[in-house]
Image (spheres, rainbow, N blue to C red):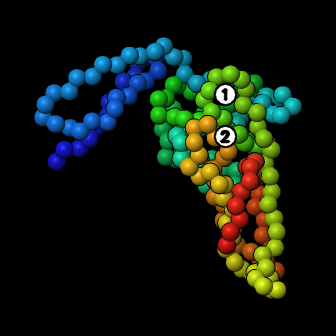
Amino acid sequence: WHPDFKLQIEATGYGPVSSETRLFKKAPHTFAFKMRASSGWAGRVLTSDGKPVSDARVILCQSGDSPMNEPGTLRTDHLDRNRHTRTDTTGRFHLPHNVEVDFAFVIHELGCARTTLDRLRRGPVILEPWGRVEGTLRVGDRPGANQAVALYSGSLAASKADTSVAFCYQTNTDAEGRFAFEKVPPGIPTLCR
C-alpha cells in the first residue's frame, strides 16, 4: 500500500503553501517551501449603486465548486470555517489566506456575485440582482402537467477567470404546466425537462 500525499505549511502572517502530490515511499522526502507574507483575503461588498451590503455571505471556492444547491441558499456544510464568513455593517469581510481557492462567491437577499481573486484584490464586489425564470411547459398541444423541470448554468465547471455562478435548480410544473424559478443568478441558464 503506497498512498500519495501532499504537505501544506501554514504560519501566522503568511499565506499557506502546498507541495506537489507525491507517492509515499520508504525513502525520505525533502521539501523546500518559500512562504510569502499575507494578511488573507479582504474585500467589500456593495450594491450596484455603491451602498454597502451588510450580512452578505462570502465563500471562497475552488474551480468546479457549485456553492448554491437551492435558490438563494449558500452551501457551506462541507467547508471549514476559514472559507466562509459574513460582511459587517460597512460591507467589509476578511478571511484567512487559503492556497486551495480560486474565486469568491457572495450571496445576499439583494443578489449575488462571483469574482476572481485578482478582481477581489483590485476593488469591491458588486452584487448583481436576482432574476426570475417562469414559463409554461407544453408537450405537443397540451400542457406538460406535473413534470420535472430543471434550470442550470452552463458553467458547472467554470474556469478561474469565469465569473458566472454555477447552479442547478429543480421544480415540478403545476396542473397547467406552469413553473417558476426564483433567485436566479445573472447569466444565460439552460432549461430542460
Element under disc 2: loop
**Toward which corner of the image does residue 7 lie, by quadrant?**
top left
**Residue 143 position (above or below residue 89):** below
Q: Position of residue 60 (x, y in %)?
A: 57, 36
Q: Quadrant of the C terminus?
A: bottom right
Residue 59 against residue 51 in the figure, above or below? below
Name the residue at 81% across, 34% down: 47
Towards the viewer: 46 or 20: 20
The image quarter containing residue 19 is: top left
Q: Amino acid at mark 2?
A: Thr
Residue 111 % position (x, y) = 76, 43
Q: Is residue 15 left or right of residue 132?
A: left
Crowd rating for badge 2 (residues with CA inside 10 Å; few <14, some 14–19, many 20+): some
Secondary element type, mark 1:
helix
**Is 55 situated left or right of 62 in this image?**
right
Q: CA distance from mark 2 to mark 1?
A: 10 Å
Q: Is residue 110 above or below residue 182?
A: above
Residue 109: x percent and y percent?
76, 44
Residue 119: mark in rendering: 1
| Amino acid type, callout 1 | Arg
On the image, which quarter does residue 177 sit in? bottom right
Image coords of residue 170 (percent x, y): 66, 65
Q: Are marks 2 and 1 in contact (CB under 8 Å)?
A: yes
The label on residue 41 is none
Residue at 49 percent across and 29 percent down: it is 98
Give whichever of discs 2 and 1 has the lower sequence position.
1
Q: Which residue is mark 2?
A: 163
Residue found at x 64% / y 40%: 162
List the single residue furthest toward the right: 49
Crowd band around label 1 with a 10 angstrom C-alpha radius: few (<14), some (14–19), many (20+): some
Q: Is residue 53 visible?
A: no
